Structures are given as structure tokens and as C-alpha cells.
Image (cartoon, helix red, strand yellow):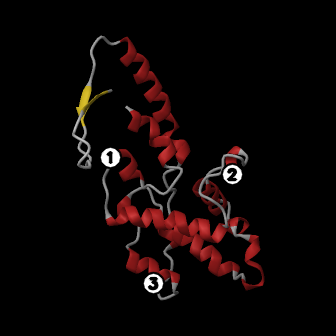
Amino acid sequence: MMFRLLIPFMFRGYLAPEYAIRGQVTKKSDIYSYGVLLLEIVSGRCNTNTRLPSEDQFLLERTWGLYEEGRLEEIIDIDIGDDLDVEEACGFLKIGLLCTQDAMARRPNMTNVVRMLTGEKRIPVDKITRPAMITDFADLKVSSKEQRTSETRSPTTKSFTTTEPFSSSETPTQSSM
């Protein structure tokens, strides 16, 4: 149950949707994380900042919104200064958006990411689609609350066995949900 409660918070970071929801780890999960990191570098911002207005709290969502509006340059870190090449920085942001595609099959492999970053390969902007957004998963939080309410009313107790590695001082245990 705790995992379901944490899902909306995990997307605030670097976890790919397939890993956060199903625990599925692939090379494309790392590509997603790299995309978030690339957005952070170019924007000079953390991926999450709850002190900002709600529309600016999540870097991926804000970057996507500006991309859709054709104003991607507005998210570029102004502290870059005179060395700033706006076109190149916008290209890096587009690569970051490609890396954070919801479907892992739509994300480029790392070889192609490097080739796009170095200019050896064009950025396929026609393949950039809306990434999975944190706000898309807000209903998971609501349904988790509903499930907790029904579980507290239920006379049965569910249990599970952990499968995580344990140290020599620990033993595998059963935990109640």
C-alpha cells in the first residue's frame, strides 16, 4: 500500500513511469532520468520546487507547456550569460523532452542522444509527444485514499513477503498491509 501512496511523489524526480508503476527497469528507464537531468542543467532549476506557483512546480510539466506554446527559450537559465546559444539550448531541451516520453519505445537510445547533443543527428521534433505528467497521476492518490478507507473497514488482513535483499543481521519477514 505504501508504494501506491508514493507513486505521485516519485514522478517528481527521475523515475520513469514504467519503473515507478510496475517496477520495470530497462535501459530506457535511464534515458528518462537523463532527460530530466538535461532539463535541469539547461534550465538551472531542480525538477521539483514546491515553493513556486503550482504551474511552475514541476520542471517537466513547465518545459512541456512552454514547448507547446513555442516559448521554450523562457525556461533557459539566464545565468548562462554571454556564452548562451539559445538555439542550441532549446535543442537540448527538446532532447530532454524526447528522453522523457511516456512510452519507453518512443525514447531514443543513448547513442542517438549523444549524436543529437553533438549535432551529428538532427532532433526529430515530430517525435516529441506529451510526456507523462505528475498531474496525470493525481487520481492515483485519490484512489489510494479510497482503497485505504475500504481496507480499514475490511475484517481481513492482507500480507506480503518482501523480496528485497537483506543483510546478514536481517531476515526475510512478512508484513501486514
Q: Name which of mark 2 and mark 3 comes first in the sequence.
A: 2
The residue carrying mark 2 is 56
SS class, disc 1: helix
The quarter of the picture where the N terminus appears is top left
Three-letter amino acid code at the position of disc 2:
Asp
Q: CA distance from mark 2 to mark 3?
A: 30 Å
Q: Which residue is mark 3?
A: 115
User: Is 94 in front, or is 153?
Assistant: 153
x, y (%) of residue 125? 52, 71
The one nearer the camera, 29 or 98, is 29
Mark 1 residue type: Arg
Q: Image check: 95 left or right of 54?
A: left
Outermost residue toward the bottom in this view: 120
Label 3 CA crowd tier, 10 Å (few <14, some 14–19, many 20+): few
Give the residue drawn at x 48%, y 57%: 14
Q: Quadrant of residue 115?
A: bottom left
Residue placed under numbered mark 1 in the picture = 22
The residue that appears at 72% across and 49% down in the rendered structure is 52
Residue 77's image quarter? Answer: bottom right
What amino acid does circle 3 point to? Arg
Q: Are marks 2 and 3 in contact (CB under 8 Å)?
A: no
Q: CA distance from mark 1 to mark 2?
A: 28 Å
Residue drawn where x is 48% and y is 47% of the image: 10
